[in-house]
Structures are given as C-alpha cells and as structure tokens.
C-alpha cells in the first residue's frame, strides 16, 4: 500500500509539471499551443451572447480571472498561482518548483489567505528528490519516505514508521509492532495478536474469544469456555458455566487417564488405565477391568440400596430391595418377590409370576426331562426329550413323538402328522389329507380340491370347477354363467346357456365340427371345405370354403333349397 502511495506522489508531481502551465494559461486568457476548438467546454459566440458569462472583459479583449500566474525558468522552473486578492505574488496560494528528474516541489497555502509564501501560516508542502526521497508536511499529514528503506508517516493522530524489517504503527485506537520475520504484535479496541513464527508461537484475541499456540501448547477461549493442552500429552477443558451446567474434562493419553465432570447430571467419570470410577446421581461404579466390577446404588435408605459385585469369571453377587442373586461357575440362583430361578448343568427350575408359572428341566446340559406348568392358564407341558412331549390346556391337547404328532383344539378340529410327510386334518367344516409334496385332497364347506402333482389338478367351489389332467385333458366350468369347456387330446366340446335353451359345439381337430342351438345348427369339414350353417331363417353353405347364403321366404321353401348365388362373407 505504501509503495503505491509513493508512486502516486511521483505521478502527481509529473502531472502538475506537464499540465499546470497550460491550465493556468487558460485561466489568464493567454494562448496555448493547442487550438481553442479542442476545449470541450468551448461554445459558439452566438450561444455565448444568449447565455452570458461570469467572466468580464478587460483591456485587450481577453477574459478576466480572479487568479494570476507568474513563472520563472532559471535556475529551475517555478510557477506561482496567486490567491484571491493577491498581486505580484503577495497573496500566492500554490507554488510549483521543478528540476526534473532531480527535484520536484509543490507548496499550497492554506487559509487564512491571502499571504506571501515566506509568511508564517498553515501550508501543505511536498517534494520528491531524486525519485527516491519523498517529503511532506501539512496540518494533517507528514511523511518522509526513502524508498525502499525508510518510511515515516503521520496521518492526524496515527503514526507509522518502517525501517527495513521494522514496522511501528500507533494511534489512539490501535498499535502494531513488527520485526519481520521474527515478531508481529498488535492491539486494537476490538482485539489483538502476537506472532513469532520462528518460535512456533501465535496468539490472537477479540471480544468473542482467544487463541494461543506455542509449539505443542495451545489454549482456546470461546466466551467463558476454555480449553488448554500440550499435544499429545495433556488436554483440559472447562465450559465456565456458572448457572448449574458446568462441564470439565482432563485427558492424559500417555497415562491412559481421563476425567470428566457434568454438574447438571451430577455425573463424574474417571478412567486411569484399567481402573474406572463413575458416579451418576446415587449410583457409584468401580471397575478394575476385566476382573472386578462393583456397582452400588445408595439412596440414603439402607433398605433401598443395591449392590452388584463381580469377580470374573469366579462369582457374581447382587442384592437389592427384595432381590438376591448368586452366580458361580455351573450355578445360578436368583430370587425376587415374583420369581425364583435356579440353573445348574443338570437341573433347572424357574418359578415366575409369583409361582403361577413353573419350568423344570433335567438339564439343560442333558435335557432328558422337562416340565412347565402355568397355574393361571391351567396349562401343563412335559416331555422326555427327544422321544415324547405332551401339552395340555383347557382347550388344546397335543402330543409329539419322533414319528408322529397330534394337535387338537376343542370346537375347531385336529391335525395329525405321520412321518415322513402324511398330514390329516379334521375340522368342524371339512377335512384335508396330504402326502407332501405330491398329494393334496380335502373339502371345506362348498369348496374341495384334489391334486396329484404334477399330473392331476381339480378345484371346485361355488363359482366353478377346474380340472386338469396334464397335458391331455383340460376342463373348466363356470356355475354362475352355465358354461363349460373341455379339451381332451384333439377333441374340444363346449356347452353354454343361451336365451331359449342350451348351445353346444363339438370339434374333432382338424377334421370335423358340429353344433346345435335353440334356433341354429352347423356342421363343417376341414374348417369350411364343406359345411352348412343355419341361424334362424339365414342359411350358409360352403363348398371349397366359398360361402353361399339364402333365406327361407316361406314354409314351403324349407323343403327345396333354392341357392341364390354366392354371398360375401
């Protein structure tokens, strides 16, 4: 940014040198080297006479001006533009001195005006020497720049000093001190920073939070929450909440240590290697993994306390309000107000629902005998595995063996299985006999079925019947519409109910076909090579597949055919 300002000063000084005399000459009415018609503000005399002008004619017919310009060319170029009310330089407001490329200077007098340039008073002075040193003095801005080594600037109450890698900047609202690339620091009303790249250190802060990193050490702050650590050895965090929801943690990976606290949940957790301590409300836990586990729930009343202790794999004991449990290798005993359970490799007993249900096993390692009883449902199940089992309830009776099984439900029916695949079901509304997966027969109400897979299929119900003797015989009957169709090898027969009676047709493919109806009949050889068809009084005879059609005009015509010639199909 400062390099751009430096070149801006140089460009401004050169522009004043090249354009200043010409612009001032126009202000005094002096001719220039450019024709007048190049002035973009020039207007024609006729329009000027109508519009008028603030410029008043003076002696010689040239327009007048409030400022005057004086110039000298030796030993350097100097141009002085007079201020209002001045004459002969006594009230000059702008002075330009040029000795390019060695020296450029511009001085502008600031109010109060008019006054001479050598008189005391506020002014804006700037100069450029040798295209390298820039100097400026004014009430608001002071600058001394020796490009590219030195920079000193003042803008109102802000000061900047740059000397090679050293940069100092200050104002009532901020300051910055840099010694590149070793040191960078600064602070403002909203925050600050410090960076030391070679020390791997950086810090920054503002109203919302802060960050500090120095090698493996870090510290962050977001609001009241703070986290610190030394990677990868130590980590710590605290949310800083003082309204009852405080959370804190500490992690030390090399020591396998972790500690966490949650104030709202009254939760504390500590892990140190294989050891674990945790407190959640009234519950306390201590684990020495993987061998020892101890859990205690202390409500303040000894009768409500619960304790669980395990020394794996040797024993587990538990106690609580109305509950006791003991687990040993090969032995489990548990007692509650509603259950009583005992497990051993050779005998098992479980009483549940306050003794309403009982299960007994001679096992489960050798489950030869078992007995289960539900006194509420009056249900009993017992068996001698794997040979026989029996189940009885007030409505269901069943027995099972390796070769046969029988299940009966009162008021519904029974089902019997005989190995390997025979099933007989007898129900109040029907029966079924199956030999899986080949034969299926049965009837339920108006429905019946008979299947000998995959050759014979027969299904009958109130709407119709379908019979298939695959692949030679097919018969389909619709009881509702009074229609039946049958295909046996190459013989097709169909019968259907029509208005006035029944219509039938029979075909022996591909030789002959015939049929009758209440007021119609037909016969055909080889699909129309020869044949006759009557529908009411309409007759159609075919010879070599050519149809001849006529009508019976009266009763006598029926005794003698009178063809009237071939008719279109």
Image (cartoon, rainbow, N blue to C red):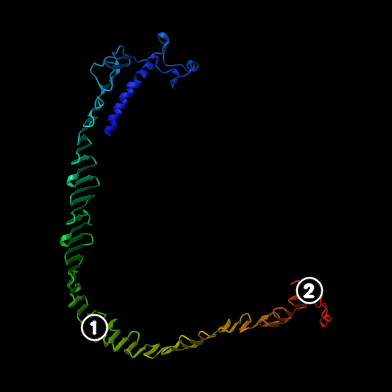
Q: What residue is pinned by disc 2?
A: 566
Circle 1: element type: strand
Q: Position of residue 77 (x, y in %)?
A: 29, 17
Category of crowding for the residue at label 1, using alpha-carbon neighbours closer than 10 angstroms: few (below 14), some (14–19), many (at least 20) = some
The C terminus appears in which quarter of the rendering?
Answer: bottom right
Circle 2: element type: loop
Which tag, 1 or 2, sits closer to the chain's start?
1
Q: Position of residue 15 (x, y in %)?
A: 33, 24
Q: Quadrant of residue 128?
A: top left
Give the label on residue 163, or none.
none
Tag 1 near tag 2, CB within 8 Å: no
For this orientation, the residue located farthest to the front is 544
For this orientation, the residue located farthest to the right is 556
- The residue lying toward the viewer, choosing from 255 and 1, is 1
Q: What residue is pinned by disc 1?
A: 342
Q: Position of residue 543 (x, y in %)?
A: 76, 78
């Amino acid at each position: 940014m400062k390099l751009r300002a430096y070149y801006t000063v140089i460009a401004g000084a050169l522009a004043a040198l090249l354009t200043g005399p010409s612009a001032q000459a126009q202000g005094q009415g002096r001719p220039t080297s450019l024709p007048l018609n190049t002035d973009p503000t020039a207007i024609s005399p006729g329009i000027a006479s109508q519009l008028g002008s603030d410029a008043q004619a003076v002696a010689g017919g040239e327009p007048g001006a409030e400022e005057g310009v004086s110039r000298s060319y030796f030993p350097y170029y100097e141009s002085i533009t007079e201020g209002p009310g001045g004459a002969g330089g006594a009230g000059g407001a702008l002075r330009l001195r040029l000795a390019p490329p060695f020296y450029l200077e511009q001085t502008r007098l600031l109010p109060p005006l008019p006054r001479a340039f050598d008189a005391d008073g506020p002014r804006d002075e700037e100069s450029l020497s040798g295209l390298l040193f820039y100097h400026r003095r004014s009430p608001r801005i002071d600058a001394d720049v020796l490009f590219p080594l030195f920079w000193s600037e003042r803008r109102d109450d802000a000061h900047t000093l740059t000397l090679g890698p050293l940069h100092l900047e200050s104002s009532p609202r901020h300051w910055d001190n840099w010694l590149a690339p070793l040191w960078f620091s600064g602070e403002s009303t909203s925050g600050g920073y410090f960076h030391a790249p070679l020390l791997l250190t950086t810090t920054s802060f503002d109203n919302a939070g802060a960050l500090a990193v120095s090698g493996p050490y870090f510290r962050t702050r977001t609001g009241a929450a703070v986290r610190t650590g030394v990677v990868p050895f130590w980590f710590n965090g605290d949310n800083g909440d003082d309204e009852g929801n405080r959370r804190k943690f500490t992690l030390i990976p090399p020591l396998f240590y972790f500690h966490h606290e949650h104030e709202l949940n009254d939760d504390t957790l500590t892990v140190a290697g294989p050891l674990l301590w945790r407190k959640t409300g009234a519950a306390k836990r201590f684990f020495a993994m993987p061998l020892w586990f101890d859990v205690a729930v202390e409500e303040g009343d000894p009768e409500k306390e619960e304790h669980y202790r395990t020394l794996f794999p040797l024993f587990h004991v538990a106690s609580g309000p109305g509950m006791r449990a003991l687990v040993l290798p090969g032995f489990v005993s548990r007692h509650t107000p509603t259950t009583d359970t005992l497990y051993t490799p050779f005998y098992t007993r479980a009483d549940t629902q306050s003794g309403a249900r009982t299960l007994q096993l001679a096992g489960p390692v050798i489950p030869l005998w078992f007995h289960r009883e539900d006194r509420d449902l009056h249900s009993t199940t017992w068996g001698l595995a794997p040979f026989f089992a029996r189940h009885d309830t007030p409505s269901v009776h069943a027995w099972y063996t390796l070769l046969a099984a029988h299940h009966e439900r009162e008021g519904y029916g029974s089902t019997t299985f005989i190995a390997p695949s025979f099933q007989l079901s007898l129900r109040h509304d029907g029966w079924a006999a199956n030999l899986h997966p080949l034969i299926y027969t049965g009837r339920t109400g108006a429905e019946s079925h008979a299947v000998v897979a995959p050759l014979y299929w027969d299904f009958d119900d109130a709407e119709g019947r379908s019979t298939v003797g695959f692949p030679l015989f097919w018969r389909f009957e619709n009881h509702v519409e009074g229609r039946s169709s049958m295909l046996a090898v190459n013989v097709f027969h169909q019968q259907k109910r029509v208005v006035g009676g029944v219509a039938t047709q029979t075909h022996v493919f591909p030789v002959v076909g015939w049929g009758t109806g209440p007021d119609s009949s037909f016969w055909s050889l080889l699909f129309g090579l020869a044949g006759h068809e009557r529908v009411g009084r309409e007759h159609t005879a075919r010879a070599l597949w050519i149809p001849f059609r006529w009508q019976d005009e009266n009763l006598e015509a029926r005794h003698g055919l009178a063809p009237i010639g071939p008719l279109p199909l």
